Image (cartoon, helix red, strand yellow):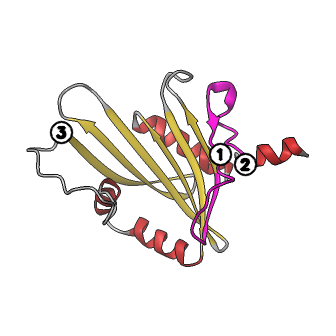
Amino acid sequence: MLLSACTSRFGVGIAELPASQGWQPLPIGSWVLNDGIEPRSMVFCPREACTKQGFASVVAFSGSQARRMEQALGADPAGLARLFSKPPPGDGRKKAKPKGPAKSTTVVSRFEAEGVAGILVEIRAKDGSGKSAATVILHGREADRLIIALAVAQDAEAARRDAIAAWRSR
């Protein structure tokens, strides 16, 4: 019984992103969240364990939280990407002064996978280093809940694969 209580703290995991491949569950049982937000699973694959570092999660929203999130996800994807890149208002940080031209490019696109809507955000360095990152968000309704599967990886293909794996585990 004690073992069962300890393991539920980490959620159910993501079957297609197993520990045997380096994926480690993150603790979600002790989260203090707003009403209407339910973390289901979160996994991380650190650089030491995986050839490509990554993060994937499944979160469910209900009530007014679901409506607000669905509205945000349905809005202009470029605007959504800008919102994610800004610090929250009143976070205590000084406003940054413009430092010249942007050092990266961001491309946002919509797609469909597993029968649900998806958003892909790709960020690439402009310096020719080849550095990049991608986030994929899959979202869809299940009864009265909005389910979101999210993945972050070094490239769009890996982020899409991991987000689909997370969606299947919902």
Rendered position, 135 above or below 118: above
Residue type at mark 3: give it: Lys
Q: Secondary structure at mark 1?
A: loop
Is residue 30 found inside the magenta-colored segment of the image?
A: yes
Q: Residue at x 50, y 44 (%)?
A: 151
How far apart are the two marked residues, 2 and 1, measured between alpha carbons?
Answer: 6 Å
Q: Secondary structure at mark 2?
A: loop
Q: Give the magenta-colored segment's residue range.
A: 12-40
Q: Nearer the viewer, residue 111 or 145?
A: 145
Q: Which residue is mark 2?
A: 9
Rendered position, 143 above or below 150: below
Q: What type of secondary structure mainly makes up the magenta span? A: loop
Numbered label tally: 3
How far apart are the two marked residues, 3 and 1, measured between alpha carbons?
Answer: 34 Å
Instruction: Return the mark for residue 27.
Output: 1
Q: Residue at x 58, y 64 (%)?
A: 33
Instruction: Return the mark for residue 103.
Output: 3
Q: Residue at x 28, y 48 (%)?
A: 107
Q: Earlier in the sequence, mark 3 or mark 1?
A: 1
Residue 149 horizontal/vertical position (percent): 55, 53
Q: Quadrant of residue 21?
A: top right
Residue type at mark 2: give it: Arg
Crowding near pointer 1: few (<14 within 10 Å), some, many (20+)?
some
